[in-house]
Amino acid sequence: MPSEEAFWNSVTLDWFFSHSGWSFLPFMMMMILVFAAFMVAFVLFLYMISPLISPKPLKLNGAHVVVTGGSSGIGKCIAMECYKQGAFITLVARDEGKLVQAKKAVEKCAINDKQVVLCISVDVSKDYSQVESVLKQAQEKLGPVDMLVNCAGTAVSGKFEELGVQHFQSLMEVNYLGSVYATRAVISNMKERRMGRVVFVCSQAGQLGLFGYTAYSASKFALRGLAEALQMEVKPYNIYVTVSYPPDTDTPALAEENKMKPLETKLISETSGVYQPEQVAKVIVKDAVLCVCCMVQQGNFSSSVGPDGYMLSALTCGMSPVTSITEGLQQIVTMGLFRTIALFYLSSFDSIVRRCMIQREQSKASNKTE
């Protein structure tokens, strides 16, 4: 009797393995690979057609655009790009000499003889009442502000314990409070008119924290929080916010920052390359003045540059506003794939930091032996 039971058990097991999913394992693996390939193709397809299905841009012809930090770098290039589309420009910066040079550069981009470039020398990070006063004067001369571009900023990199406390304070003042003051000075008028655009030029360091950017990243993360909360407040008034996350850009500010940048920060930054300010400015302006329909002024909340920027924005979107269903679907579909890629990036960044630490310790040891 036991031998008969053993026989039937053996037959049952053979039948189970021959008719269960085990025999379909190769087929299942093939289906998984096909699905993964389909997802990758779908992601690439969405990325490629996104410019084709984006809303039509809202014309800037005759609009009053205020650009803080407009005397050089990305800010000056944004002013030039807007001027090419017929806007009236107010440049705001501290250095009067650079402002005069920037004004000449912007005026060369005129498309009609009615356009005007106004220059205002003021430190937007110090005294709110002064910022409010000068922007009021600008509106009296060129009309109400249609779009404010907060581009005034600075960068300091270094190890957390080696940075002075004053660096943390100054970066918050310039990068964060400078944007708060300028925005607060124009937002009430935008609400009364029920129209307007506010742009915050942030940084990829405002999407993820990197070695050497404990002070800088904190000030840029603050901008994102401000932008998200402000967007929810002003959206009923037909005012829309855009946050731009440009990568390293070839500007005088970057050249100055590189003089004191830690080796680890340099090596990590080199993995994404350096972009030209003209290229970055075109993307910011395009994303800021998009229009979802002919009756509603609305732009992209998040603006990124290049494939790395696109991936980073999708990864860090969180509870950020979306401009369209397409944008939301892109973020949903790409999240898993991009997170996998990001893990490899993070691993490589950690490896860079460890290698630099080991090299530094070996160098100290060799110096002691000598």
Image (cartoon, grey):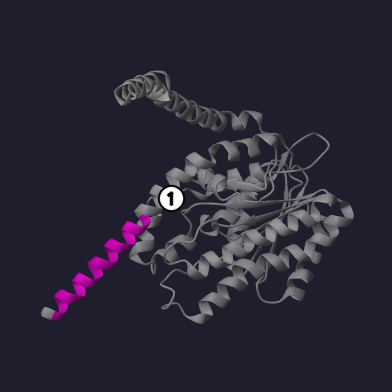
Q: Quadrant of residue 206?
A: bottom right
Residue found farthest to the right: 192
Give the residue drawn at x 80%, y 34%: 294
Which residue occupies the foreground of this view, 226 or 111? 226
Give the residue drawn at x 39%, y 25%: 22
In the displayed structure, does residue 169 sit left or right of residue 121? left
Q: Quadrant of residue 59?
A: top right
Q: Quadrant of the C terminus?
A: bottom left
Which residue occupies the foreground of this view, 202 or 252? 202
Asked if 296 appears above or below 130 in the picture, the reply is above
> What secondary structure is found at the residue carrying circle 1?
loop
Region in magenta: 349-368
Residue 26: tell me if it is visible.
no
In the displayed structure, does residue 203 sit left or right of residue 238? left
Residue 183 image offset from top left, x and y in percent: 74, 62
Q: Quadrant of residue 61?
A: top right
Asked if 130 appears above or below 228 in the picture, the reply is below
**Mark 1: which amino acid?**
Val
On the image, numbered disc 1 is attached to which residue? 274
Q: Quadrant of the N terminus?
A: top left
Residue 292 image offset from top left, x and y in percent: 75, 36
In the displayed structure, does residue 106 sit left or right of residue 138? left
Indicate yes or no whether the magenta region holds residue 27.
no
Give the residue drawn at x 40%, y 26%: 29
Asked if 270 appears above or below 175 in the picture, the reply is above
Residue found farthest to the front: 1
Give the residue drawn at x 36%, y 20%: 8
Q: Main secondary structure of the magenta part?
A: helix
Residue 193 image offset from top left, x and y in percent: 88, 52
